[in-house]
């Protein structure tokens, strides 16, 4: 009887034992199924072959007044300060040495005649003021000399100041030198030839006369250029005119010469060349040593009074659709707000801030790095 009771109770005891094991976490039934489900749930939270975990966070909608749109970066961003500094406006331009207009002199005869002696017979010869250039026989001048001498002789017998004055004026109108006129009166003799003299010291840049040439009052015989002072003419684009207007003095470096020259602004042309869209800047330069020659290539460096300017690195400004932006740090750490600014180039590394920023503002050092899709979609900048 007792055997039958044990046989009936054995399944119940086994079930009870299994239940106790399951409650202790050692359940064996359905083990494979449970493991698979755990693996499936774990894999849902991971991107295959990626070390980045996807963390889902609830989206909290803002309540009340919305905060202005900002660009938020969760990593360390390098920033810089807007600084105020004393700067000297710098400008580099290029030009050429040219002769001053007022120092270019033409030598002409005020009469017609024939060249009998030529004293300056080569181009680019250096001459001094008053140096003899050529001697010319002119029948017209020779007759005027005779008239003057006759008036002097006649005046000795019958004083007639008007006759002498009239004859003298005729010689002056023919540009006969005053020394030769005085010599006629003192020596009572006349010379057959009339000498032409250099009106200024300089270099012979043009020569249109030879031994035996026939000349008249319409022909330029020589062109003499005085190079003791020269001009530098540089071409400027329209966007450079505002800066150049503020400058008065320049340093000039001429290729091939181991020295720096100082030049002053003489003239900025009041009009632009319509073909080149450029204006001409003219500087005056002392050339007493005559080392500078027309046609030489020169580099111009500006120098001016120091002024206070707000300065930022060029990398801190970004241009989009014709407008410049910088990213200003907000009161919230790690957030930067795009801000419209106005700048102009200061040098190859810096911008001058005209508006939009203030001294001490903290901005992102690299504005291009802050461009992200969210800001563009939301039309933040």
Image (tube, grey):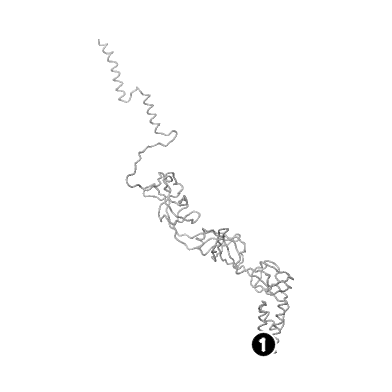
Single out the residue that lies furthest toward the bottom.
Answer: 157
259 to the left or right of 7: right
- Residue at image location 27% in from the left, 14% down from the top: 8
319 to the left or right of 108: left
- For label 1, the crowd category at 10 Å Cα-Cα, with few meaning under 14, some 14 to 19 and many 20 or more, is few
318 to the left or right of 160: left
Q: Which corner quadrant of the image does residue 199 belong to? A: bottom right
- Residue at image location 58% in from the left, 65% down from the top: 231
Q: Which corner quadrant of the image does residue 156 belong to? A: bottom right
Considering depth in this image, is 25 or 302 the residue closer to the camera? Answer: 302
Q: Is residue 292 above or below residue 44?
A: below
Residue 276: image location, x then y, percent: 57, 58
Considering depth in this image, is 200 or 158 the residue closer to the camera? Answer: 158
Considering depth in this image, is 93 or 69 the residue closer to the camera? Answer: 69
- Residue at image location 69% in from the left, 89% down from the top: 158
Q: Secondary structure at mark 1?
A: loop
Residue 18: image location, x then y, percent: 31, 21
Residue 294: image location, x then y, percent: 62, 63
Considering depth in this image, is 230 or 153 the residue closer to the camera? Answer: 153
Q: Is residue 173 above or below residue 158?
A: above
Q: What count of labels does the image hold?
A: 1
Single out the residue that lies furthest toward the front.
Answer: 274
Name the residue carrying label 1: 160
Rendered-image quadrant of the N terminus = top left
Residue 193: image location, x then y, percent: 72, 76
Single out the residue that lies furthest toward the top.
Answer: 1
């Amino acid at each position: 009887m007792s055997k039958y009771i044990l046989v009936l109770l054995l399944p119940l005891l086994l079930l009870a034992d299994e239940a106790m094991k399951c409650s202790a976490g050692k359940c064996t039934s359905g083990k494979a199924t449970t493991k698979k489900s755990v693996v499936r749930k774990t894999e849902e939270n991971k991107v295959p072959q990626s070390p980045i975990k996807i963390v889902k966070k609830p989206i909290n909608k803002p309540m009340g007044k919305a905060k202005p749109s900002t660009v938020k970066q969760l990593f360390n961003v390098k920033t810089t300060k807007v600084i105020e500094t004393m700067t000297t406006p710098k400008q580099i331009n290029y030009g050429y040495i040219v002769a001053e207009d007022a120092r270019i002199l033409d030598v002409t005869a005020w009469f017609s005649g024939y060249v009998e002696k030529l004293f300056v017979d080569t181009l680019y010869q250096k001459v001094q003021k008053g140096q003899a250039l050529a001697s010319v026989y002119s029948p017209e001048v020779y007759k005027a000399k005779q008239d003057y001498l006759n008036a002097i002789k006649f005046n000795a017998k019958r004083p007639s100041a008007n006759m002498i004055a009239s004859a003298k004026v005729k010689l002056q109108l023919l540009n006969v030198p005053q020394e030769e006129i005085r010599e006629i009166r003192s020596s009572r003799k006349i010379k057959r030839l009339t000498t032409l003299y250099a009106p200024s010291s300089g270099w012979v840049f043009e020569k249109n006369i030879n031994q035996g040439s026939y000349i008249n009052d319409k022909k330029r015989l020589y062109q003499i250029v005085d190079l003791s002072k020269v001009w530098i003419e540089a071409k400027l684009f329209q966007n450079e005119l505002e800066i150049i207007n503020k400058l008065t003095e320049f340093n000039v470096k001429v290729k091939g010469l181991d020295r720096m020259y100082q030049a002053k602004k003489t003239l900025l042309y009041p009009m632009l060349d319509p073909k080149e869209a450029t204006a001409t800047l003219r500087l005056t330069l002392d050339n007493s040593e005559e080392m500078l020659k027309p046609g030489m290539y020169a580099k111009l460096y500006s120098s001016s009074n120091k002024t206070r300017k707000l300065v930022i690195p060029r990398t801190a400004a970004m241009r989009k659709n014709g407008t410049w932006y910088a990213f200003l740090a907000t009161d919230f750490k790690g957030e930067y707000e795009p801000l419209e600014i106005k700048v102009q180039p200061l040098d190859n590394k810096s911008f001058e801030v005209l508006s939009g920023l203030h001294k001490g503002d903290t901005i992102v050092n690299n504005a291009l790095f802050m461009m992200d899709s969210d800001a563009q979609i939301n039309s933040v900048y």
